[in-house]
Image (cartoon, rainbow, N blue to C red):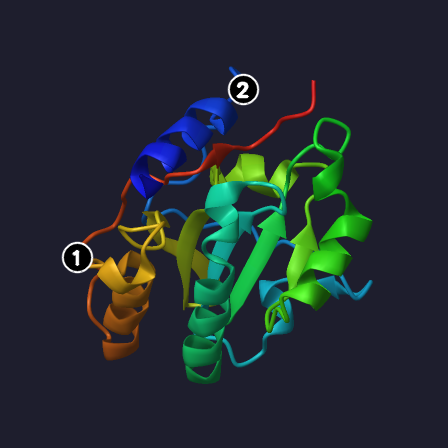
């Protein structure tokens, strides 16, 4: 029943603009961005002086799929930020199209759900377009190499959005674990599953 319900939700919310960004591929050097956090401060990867890399997740308030990953994102940041891979969450949805995803609403959600990571507002949608984000959630794992930020993984956080206890493949965690060991990421890309990002017209 839960899978059927999620299927109906998916059909209703997976609306992707024809102006879909191409974005980076694993191995590409990515931009060093800075966006407004829910606390009003500007935050970006460059602010983490001791970072070995970072986990970037494009998400939002309204999407049912994104809501299923809120606690898992808290756990990823709790586990990997101390090891040099902080999690940065970014909302890029057009707030005029989806008022629930506006900045004030982001502040409220971060407080209600006790986010332990920055929740950044990509009002211009430039960062989402640069990375080629298409869904919420859509995750990226980035490694710092020779002073540059290099994309190592793009796609889903794991393989089961609706039932966390039945996850078999933790794509983001596995990618970060490999990088921490100094290994190559075996699975460099998967298909993100969620609501389509709502692009400005």
Residue at position x 42%, y 52% in the image: 140
Calculate the distance from the C-alpha at mark 2 to the C-alpha at mark 1: 31 Å
Quadrant including the N terminus: top left
Are there few (<14), some (14-19), or many (20+) residues within 10 Å of tag 2?
some
Q: Residue furthest bottom?
A: 82
Pointer 2 residue = 17
Are there few (<14), some (14-19), or many (20+) residues within 10 Å of tag 1?
few
Indicate the position of residue 174 as horizontal and vertical percent values: 25, 65
Q: Residue furthest front?
A: 1
Query: Residue 128 falls in which quadrant of the image?
Result: top right
Answer with left or right where residue 132 lies relative to residue 177: right
Of residues 32 and 121, the one nearer the viewer is 121
Residue at position x 30%, y 54% in the image: 158
Looking at the image, can residue 134 be seen? no
Pointer 1 residue = 186
Secondary structure at badge 1 equals: loop
């Amino acid at each position: 029943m839960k899978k059927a319900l999620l299927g109906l939700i998916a059909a209703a919310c997976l609306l992707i603009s024809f102006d879909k960004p191409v974005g980076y591929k694993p191995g590409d050097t990515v931009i060093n961005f800075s966006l407004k956090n829910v606390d009003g401060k500007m935050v970006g990867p460059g602010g983490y002086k001791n970072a070995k890399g970072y986990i970037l997740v494009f998400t939002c308030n309204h999407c049912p799929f994104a809501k299923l990953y809120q606690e898992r994102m808290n756990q990823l940041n709790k586990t990997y930020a101390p090891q040099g891979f902080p999690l940065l969450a970014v909302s890029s949805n057009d707030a005029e199209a989806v008022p629930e995803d506006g900045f004030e609403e982001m502040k409220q959600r971060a407080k209600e759900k006790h986010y332990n990571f920055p929740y950044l507002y990509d009002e211009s949608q430039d960062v989402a377009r640069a990375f080629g984000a298409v869904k919420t959630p859509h995750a990226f794992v980035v490694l710092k190499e020779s002073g540059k930020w290099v994309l190592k993984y793009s796609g889903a956080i794991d393989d089961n959005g609706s039932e966390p206890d039945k996850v078999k493949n933790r794509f983001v965690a596995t990618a970060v674990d490999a990088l921490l060991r100094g290994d190559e990421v075996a699975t460099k890309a998967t298909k993100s599953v969620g609501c389509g990002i709502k692009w400005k017209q």
